[in-house]
Amino acid sequence: MSSSKIAIIVAGMAGITAARTLTAAGCNVQVFEKSRGSGGRLASKRSDMGRVNLGAQSFATQDPAFTAELQAWQQAGWVTRSDSAPYDWTGAPYMSALTRNLLGHITTHFACEIRALSHDDNGWLLYDQHEQAHGPFQQLIVAIPAPQAQILLSHCAPDLAAQAAAVKMQAVWMVALGFKQPITTTPNLAQLDTSVIADIIPTAQDDVHPMQTWMLRASDQWSEQHLEDEKEQVITALREAFTTLFNTPLPAHDSAFAHRWRYALGALNPPVDNLADPQRGLYLAGDWCHAGDVYGAWCSGQDAAQRILQQAAQ
């Protein structure tokens, strides 16, 4: 298997999990990531509030295999476990640090967006945004959101593209508000308008966070209705909804940003395990192929890698 070249698109949890499993088995793996850093929806952002997790703020599992993996990552200092919720984990010191540590020395091409694919007897060629060809690769794992997979595979693998098209993925807006003078009153979550804000995650002011930060996750419905709004409009709307949780007026925030996840949530229901064309060495992965969360992404990456290894062993 070491002489077989494997390409993986992209460097989210599913792609990284597959890359680690295949690399450990002695495979020649290359990862292609359109962003400048790893993580997918485990990405983090540098800001004047400090590092802020843009997507998943934590993840949970009760699966013994994933828990064992997380415990190994905890020993390495890559994740921390919640004291109050023993099944909840987060990247240390932030989410994208976890994915960067998981990637390690695996060859990864950052800022390299794969926009087209072709296949012949030599394998797969990947064409980036500069029309440069990469490959050939004998095996290919496509670990991107379902709507993007549908577009990428529409010409070279229409049957798999049709399966990806069946997945409805939900957009989500995230807004971070930073306060140099921390808010000391407790928000009354009983007053939360869940039609606007689905979740609120505070981060305390400390040595690495110069401001107290409140991350606001808009509801699925609100996010869809306001998908194309300007970021400032989204910040204003969620700030107003946040303000209603306090009995006293809030000070002006000192920093704010909004981030739109166009493809945040969604999964096949029920999950399927045949998202592949083994004869041509093509496999789909991603949280949408399984449970629609970080655990699902990990499972999906493991499944794709194991199918490649099993195919090679035949």
Image: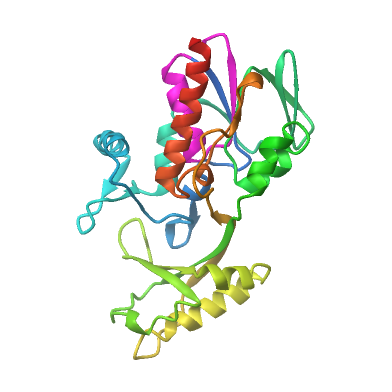
Magenta stretch in the rendered image:
1-26
Q: Is residue 113 above or below residue 137?
A: below
Q: Is residue 18 magenta?
A: yes
User: Residue furthest toward the bottom?
Assistant: 248
Q: Is residue 115 visible?
A: no
Residue 74 location, quadrant: top left
Question: Toward the viewer: 160 or 225?
Answer: 160
Is 51 rendered above or below residue 153?
below
Image quadrant assignment for residue 155: top right
- Residue lying at 75% horizontally and 37% vertically, measured from the top left: 129
Q: Position of residue 18 (x, y in %)?
A: 48, 29
In the rendered image of this protein, does residue 174 appear above or below residue 10?
below
Residue located at (73% from left, 43% from top): 151
Q: Is residue 108 left or right of residue 249?
A: right
Q: Position of residue 123 (x, y in %)?
A: 70, 17
Question: Residue 75 versus residue 178: which sits nearer the camera?
Answer: 75
| Number of marks in the rendered image | 0
Residue 29 visible to an observer of this rendering: yes
Image coordinates of residue 81 in percent, x first then y, are 25, 49
Q: Is residue 66 left or right of residue 230?
A: left
